[in-house]
Image (cartoon, rainbow, N blue to C red):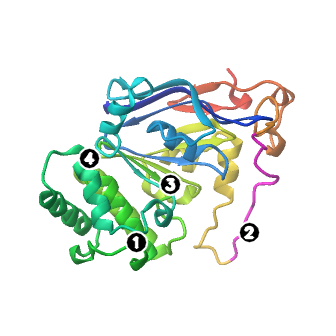
Amino acid sequence: MSEKLLRISSLKTYYFSRKSVIKAVDDVSLEISRGEMVGLVGESGSGKSTLGLSIVKLVPPPGKIIDGRIILDGKDILKLSDKELRKIRGKRIGMIFQDPLTCLDPLRRIGDQIVETILTHLRIDKEDAREIAMKTLERVGIPSDRIDNYPHQLSGGMRQRAMIAMSIALDPELLIADEPTTALDVVVQSRIMDLLEDLRTERNMSILLITHDLALVIERSNRVVIMYGGKVCEIGLVKDIAEDPLHPYTKLLLQSIPDIEKIKTELKPIPGSPPDMRNPPPGCRFWPRCPYTLERCKDTEPNLTIIEGRVVACHLYRG
């Protein structure tokens, strides 16, 4: 049995305003094993990015983690002090943010930004840190002579690689990749994913791949976590999810993936829109869009049920 690196239990992260509370992550539980790539999938607004930020306690205000546990190798991250957290961020947990152009400092060379990350955690001189930074850039496919470039001097794919280099410079045990291929062409996207896969196999690194692209997750991940409206709908192995999805939302997501091998493919969009998280529907949050809605779906929230090693939250499988 694979060793569990990260265990998230009953996590609740809410955003507070004067008029409402947005339950972005509402009672979410999941696990990630060492050396495993887990795909976290859902439409925009499902709570994926907030979950990723919660793991490293970087939820921006007015967001707040109000309950739950995040256990990294036996330690509860939510109980650590700011000083202890700084030792974990970058060293044990790396994070690739959605937009590298906004996350990289435009006024500083990319090498200086990577060196700063290294010096924060290692007691070495600046020259040694720069050497590590150059090797890390080469590792992600950026020539070492680009170390003194500014972010605007790099292409979109190279900026993404620079962000990855900053995230993996210290060989973290867990890498959180939030939409690492957004706005990149398919060739660059494939290279980025090949790079992440190489890191996973070479370093036994665990990766949480956050994306709205279920096809990408099926191609690259070991397991899939489906989120909708701040909650987990289904968790299972990629093969099981792809061949026999249980939750109606998962089924509709799969039906919306175009098949390039067919000359004429009828796209089947999911009807309706994601819920307004300021005022989500009672009961199951997916029932207004679900083709299998039962009466109890409209007023009773489904519990997570284990079915043949898979986890699903749906009244169709109650009992």
Q: Is residue 27 left or right of residue 299?
A: left
C-alpha separation, residue under disc 2 versus residue under disc 1: 41 Å
Whether 161 is among the magenta residues is no
Discs 4, 2 touching: Cβ within 8 Å: no
Q: Earlier in the sequence, mark 4 or mark 2?
A: 4
Task: Name the secondary structure under disc 3.
Answer: helix
C-alpha separation, residue under disc 3 versus residue under disc 4: 36 Å
C-alpha separation, residue under disc 2 versus residue under disc 3: 20 Å
Q: Earlier in the sequence, mark 1 or mark 3?
A: 1
Total marks shown come to 4
Discs 3, 4 touching: Cβ within 8 Å: no
Q: Is residue 141 left or right of residue 215?
A: left
Q: Earlier in the sequence, mark 1 or mark 4?
A: 4
Q: Earlier in the sequence, mark 3 or mark 4?
A: 4
In the foreground, 44 or 293: 44
C-alpha separation, residue under disc 1 versus residue under disc 4: 21 Å
- Name which residue type carries label 3: Ile
Task: Tell me what residue is drawn at x 79 percent, y 52 percent.
Answer: 273
**Comparing marks 1 and 3, which lies closer to the viewer?**
1
Q: Which of the labelled discs sits on residue 151, or is there none?
A: 1
Task: Name the secondary structure under disc 2.
Answer: loop
- Name which residue type carries label 1: Pro
Q: Which of the labelled discs sits on residue 120, or is there none?
A: 4
Disc 2 target residue: 266
Q: Quadrant of residue 241?
A: top right
C-alpha separation, residue under disc 1 versus residue under disc 3: 32 Å
Mark 3, residues whose alpha carbon is within 10 Å: few (<14), some, or many (≥20)?
A: some
**Comparing marks 2 and 3, which lies closer to the viewer?**
3
**Comparing marks 3 and 4, which lies closer to the viewer?**
4
Q: Is 204 placed above or below 217 here?
A: above
C-alpha separation, residue under disc 4 versus residue under disc 2: 52 Å
